[in-house]
Image (cartoon, rainbow, N blue to C red):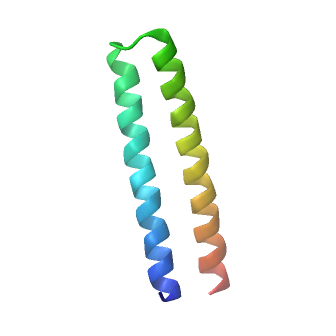
Amino acid sequence: MSEREEILALESAVTAIEEAAQAVSREVERGRLGEASIARLSRVEAELDRSRLTLEKIIREETSRG
């Protein structure tokens, strides 16, 4: 896989993470879940955000190198 293809794959992963985080957020906002489920989903959302930030940092580093 070329460097450009790798960057595109990382960017696709960022998009997928953003979509997953939005879906989690919508479920929390609906208010139909119990407190324990909301707490777990909030942790999942935070992990997704951290993963997105990490991938974005990698993309920035790789694109500035190349």
Say above or below: 43 vs 20.
above
How far from the left and from the top, in percent, is residue 21? 44, 40
Please tell me which residue is depicted at 50% across the width and 76% down the height of the picture.
7
The residue lying at 64 percent from left, 79 percent from top is: 64
* Number of disc labels: 0
Considering the image in quadrants, where does the C terminus appear? bottom right
x, y percent for residue 53: 60, 53
Query: Which residue is found at the position 47% from the left and 58% from the top?
Result: 14
- Residue 2 place in picture, x, y as percent: 49, 89
| 58 to 51, vertically: above or below | below
Query: 47 or 18, which is in the foreground?
Result: 47
Task: Give me the residue at 58% from left, 61% from top.
Answer: 55
Rendering quarter of residue 30:
top left
Quadrant in the picture for residue 27: top left
Q: Which x, y percent locates residue 15?
A: 40, 56
